Image (spheres, helix red, strand yellow):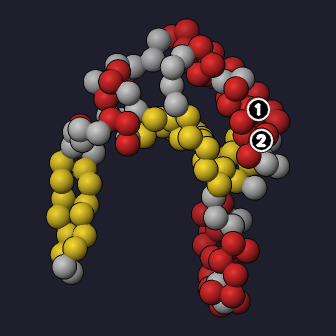
C-alpha cells in the first residue's frame, strides 16, 4: 500500500524559517534509511503559504486567493510518499524520524489504488490510468 505522510505547517515553517543544518543532516540520514528499505517513493518540503495561492471554484467560475493563509493547523509543510505493507509499518517508520524530538503532528493517509474504485473504474479507465502511470515513470 502507498501512504502519504503529511508534515503539518507551524509558525516557523509559515514564517519561512529554514531547518537547521543538524536537522537537515538527521532528516537526510532518515530518508536514506527509507530509500535503502525500498519504502521512499517521494519526499518534498513546501514553501510557506505566503508564496502560494488557492483556487476557489463555484458558480462555473474560479477565483484565485493569494496566500498567506491564516489557519496554520490546516496547512502542509511537506510530505513523503511511502510504499509500506500497512499503516502500522508507516507508524513504525515515522516514530524513527527526526520528528520524535519535536512537538510536530504528522498525518498518515492511504493513497487510493485502482482496486479501491470497484466497478466505476472500467477496463478502459483502468488502461488509461496505467498508461499515464507508465508515461510518468518513464517506462
Q: Nearer the viewer, residue 106 or 135?
A: 106
Rate crowding at label 1 as few (under 14), some (14 to 19) or many (20 or more) other CA atoms within 10 Å: few
List the residue tagged with mark 2.
Answer: 88
Left of 63 or right of it: where is 103?
A: right
- Labels 2 & 1 near each other (Cβ < 8 A): yes
Left of 83 or right of it: where is 19?
A: left
Q: Which mark is residue 118?
A: none
Image quarter (top left, top right, bottom left or bottom right) of the N terminus: bottom right
Q: Is residue 134 visible?
A: no
The part of the image, by quadrant, that contains residue 89 is top right
93, above or below 110, in the image:
above
- Residue under the image location 45 percent in, 17 percent down: 19
Does dot 2 land on a helix, a strand or a loop? helix
Residue 14: x %, y % from top left = 31, 29
The part of the image, by quadrant, that contains residue 62 is bottom left
- Residue under the image location 37 percent in, 42 percent down: 74
List the residue tagged with mark 1.
Answer: 92
Residue 102: x %, y % from top left = 54, 16
Image quarter (top left, top right, bottom left or bottom right) of the C terminus: bottom right
* Residue with the most extreme top position: 22
- Residue under the image location 70 percent in, 26 percent down: 95
27, above or below 78, in the image:
above
Amino acid at each position: 500500500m502507498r501512504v502519504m505522510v503529511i508534515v503539518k505547517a507551524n509558525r516557523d515553517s509559515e514564517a519561512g524559517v529554514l531547518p537547521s543544518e543538524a536537522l537537515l543532516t538527521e532528516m537526510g540520514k532518515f530518508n536514506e534509511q527509507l530509500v535503502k528499505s525500498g519504502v521512499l517513493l517521494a519526499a518534498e518540503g513546501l514553501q510557506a503559504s505566503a508564496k502560494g495561492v488557492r483556487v476557489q471554484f463555484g458558480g462555473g467560475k474560479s477565483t484565485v486567493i493569494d496566500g498567506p493563509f491564516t489557519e496554520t493547523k490546516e496547512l502542509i509543510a511537506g510530505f513523503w510518499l511511502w510504499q509500506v505493507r500497512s499503516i502500522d509499518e508507516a507508524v513504525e517508520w515515522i516514530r524513527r524520524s527526526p520528528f520524535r524530538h519535536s512537538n510536530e503532528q504528522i498525518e498518515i493517509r492511504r493513497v487510493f489504488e485502482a482496486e479501491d474504485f470497484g466497478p466505476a473504474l472500467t477496463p478502459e479507465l483502468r488502461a488509461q490510468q496505467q498508461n499515464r502511470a507508465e508515461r510518468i515513470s518513464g517506462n
